[in-house]
Amino acid sequence: MDIDPVELRGPWTEGYALERRHALSSEFVGHDSFGNPQFDTKRSELGELIFRLKYRNDKTALDPIADAAVKFINGWGPHFDLVVAVPPSRKRLPYQPVAEIARIIAGRLSKPVNLDAVSKVKGTPELKNVYEYEQRSELLKRAFRVNGNAVAGKRILLVDDLYRSGATAKMVTHDLLAAGAAAVYFLAMTKTRTRA
């Protein structure tokens, strides 16, 4: 699969999204029978895989997503000891897409993964519906708890599925560093447009 990586600036040592444009175009096509707006959205190949995984519970998308991530990581070459997933903004059943991506990446790279290193301890609205960066950041204050014993002295590869404004990843990175992580490398699968 062809990807179009983009460097992401933040408090991490280095950060990237594998795909700079999650959605290539989106055209309004009308309303459904409940009055909800409907769109014909064209996504990048990786963007479509993330969409299928998150919103269609299509676990067959996991392998090609992980293939692209591992190939990129091997070329990038960050030195890390532990893979950690950004906690999701809401619980999805029967699995959490970003946790599954992190688990597979870690397994393929023969690195440990700790899906309990960072946990969400404060409820927040889904941030895709909050457009101002400052408002997102305020909502995320004290929203996460980091297990210092799990991350102290370790170089972390922090994984997320979708990067919008970066507010969540930046807050989690600050919290990991405050808990004693030696370094944080950040990798998002795709990047979407944001109004902030």
Image: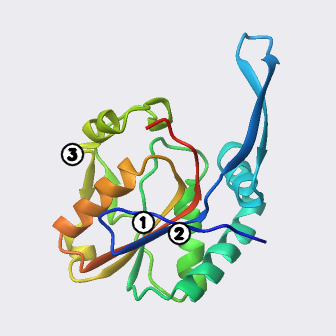
Q: Amino acid at mark 3?
A: Arg
Would you place residue 33 above or below residue 196 in this image?
Answer: above
Q: CA distance from mark 1 to mark 2?
A: 8 Å
Looking at the rendered image, the quarter that the C terminus falls into is: top left
Q: Is residue 35 left or right of residue 192?
A: right
**Which callout, 1 or 2, points at the residue further toward the start of the chain?**
2
Q: Amino acid at mark 1?
A: Leu
Q: CA distance from mark 3 to mark 1?
A: 19 Å
Asked whether the beta carbons under mark 1 and mark 2 sit within 8 Å of each other, the answer is yes
Q: Is residue 135 left or right of residue 115?
A: left
The residue at which mark 2 appears reads as 102
Q: Secondary structure at mark 2?
A: helix
Judge the density around disc 1: few (<14), some (14-19), many (≥20) Cα neighbours within 10 Å: some
Q: Which mark is residue 142?
A: 3
The residue at which mark 1 appears reads as 115
Instruction: Identify which residue, 33 or 16, lies in the foreground.
Output: 16
